[in-house]
Image (cartoon, rainbow, N blue to C red):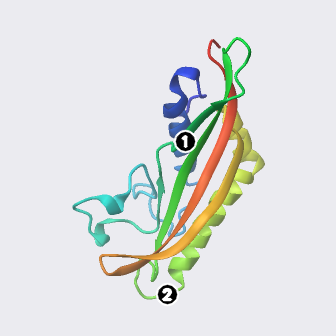
Amino acid sequence: MTNAITYDKLERYAYDNIYELINTRSNIPDPRNRPSSQKLIYKYDPLDSVNAQIVNIGFPHVVLSPVQGLVPSQESTRGNTKRYAWSQAILVRSLRFGASGSNPETGVNDLNDLSDSFTEYFNSAAGKKALSDLKIKNVKLIKVSSTPNMYDALEYYEAEFQLTYNVRINAWS
């Protein structure tokens, strides 16, 4: 459930809002068209699980990190209003040979489809309006890196994005 960011819920509502908006398949479609009961967006890294096995982890998938930076600035004279800036990492992963394990182009295509979906959503008029309604403004999505990796002897691709946004908030509103 989304809530406009408030002074007493700067991190919780910011994180929850981004998660809810990207966890909607109409905003960020699953390139594999899996049922909505299968996770696409995670609040934790499924590869960090001690019991993780590659067969039990759905690829492609997205990991939304906790808020990494929360910076206050532009404090008003009385100190009751400040601009807050947030930053979060978004990791997009896909198996090199795709879910079927047979086509080496599937992984790159899945990675690119998801990456394009994020870029499109955060730059679209509808996305900006939905974010602005929740006091998430001046949104920028920057692709930081894209690398091949190995997990459990399987190759996968990983793209990291940095999402930044800010808003001016009154402590007593």
Residue 28 visible in rendering: no
Q: Position of residue 44 (x, y in %)?
A: 38, 51
Q: Nearer the viewer, residue 167 or 95?
A: 167
Q: Which residue does the image show at 32% across and 59% down from the upper left?
A: 48
Give the side of residue 121 with respect to residue 69, left or right.
right
Which residue has dot 2 on it?
104
Tell whether 88 sits left or right of 55: right
Front residue of 26/28: it is 28
SS under mark 1:
strand
Q: Which residue is mark 1?
A: 69
Q: Earlier in the sequence, mark 2 or mark 1?
A: 1
Decide: is 96 above or below 4. Answer: below
* Amino acid type indicated by mark 1: Gly
Q: Residue at x 48, y 87 (%)?
A: 103
Q: Residue at x 73, y 39 (%)?
A: 129
Looking at the rendering, which quadrant does residue 110 occupy? bottom right
Query: Along the line of sight, which residue is nearer the eye, 85 or 133?
Result: 85
